[in-house]
Image (cartoon, rainbow, N blue to C red):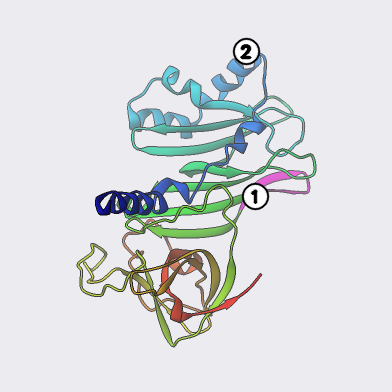
Amino acid sequence: MRKLLTIFIFLAVQTLFAQPAFFYHNQQIKEWYIQATDSVFQEDVRKVLSTDEIKALLAENKLTSEAILPFFHSIDFDQDGLSDLLFQGKLKDKNYVIIYKKKVNGEFSLIFNQMGEILQANLPNRNNPLSITIWNQVCCSFKVSTLTKWVCMIKNGVSYFECQEQSLVYRHTILPNVGDNMKPLHHFTINNEVAKLRMSPRLDDESTVDGSNAWKGNHISYHPFGATGVVYSSLKDKDNVTWYFIKINTGKEFPTKSDRFKVSDEIDDCSDYSYYGWIHGDNLNLIKP
């Protein structure tokens, strides 16, 4: 009986910390796909295959044009009645999202080019153009995942994408399973002079974890009194201590004192991003929604 109980606890923990379950794919980008006639679609794709961006991808991955044809889709991202082109695909170990806007004369111009995959999208609506969240799991030599939310803006008849949110996740971070409804449970402020954001729900300042300086401990970054953020999940450890999985805001007002995210030149300024991780409950002042 004890053996069965141990197995059950192990499976429960594995389910709780299933890596893909937190950043779920809502698959709504497929609702934007347009069923264009084969001849029109093929002609549109032919036009963008000769662009510098696509030629660079083909050369870098040593692929033929035919190999990437399944990654193209017709969409109307700005709801102007023209069939734009979305390229979304994985080449070797990297994902790419590229969007070309179709002009009135039938030619295409590049409007969006980011490494990563579309994690979430809004549903098509005449009053709301495309909004997407891009998940890039290979940033900074595979040490960091980035999540960026991009919203299509239209100004004076010109469409463009604007980045509205940026977040970072260190690769060793244990992610909780919150299902397909990732909504904040609470808002919070840091109530201690300094709080450590950690990769896992336990106090560990001794284990060696790889980082920019091969730090000891499972902490990711230090955050000052008053820093704000949101709680997505919580649990109690074996000592009945409550841990919270959070997204914490950074920036000029609440700068981190040091962190593991500064691992390459791929990210210009980590202070522009929010961080995901675990934090001890004693560090938080919870504010109910």
Please indicate whether residue 205 sits to the left or right of residue 61 in the image.
left
x, y percent for residue 218:
29, 68
Residue for point 65% across, 27% down = 107
x, y percent for residue 162:
62, 53
- Residue at disc 2, secondary structure: helix
Crowding around mark 1 (Cα neighbors within 10 Å: few <14, some 14 to 19, many 20+) is some
Task: Look at the image and tell me whether residue 269 can be seen.
Answer: no
Residue for point 41% across, 80% down = 195
**Numbered range of the magenta stretch:** 151-162
Q: How many marks?
A: 2
Q: Work out how far the residue at label 2 is from the one at label 1, CA to CA, in angstroms.
A: 29 Å
- Residue at disc 1, secondary structure: strand
Q: Is residue 46 above or below residue 212?
A: above
Q: Is residue 140 above or below residue 109?
A: below
Q: Nearer the viewer, residue 149 or 53?
A: 149
Q: Is residue 13 above or below residue 26?
A: below
Q: Which residue is mark 2?
A: 38
Residue flagged by tag 1: what amino acid is it?
Answer: Val
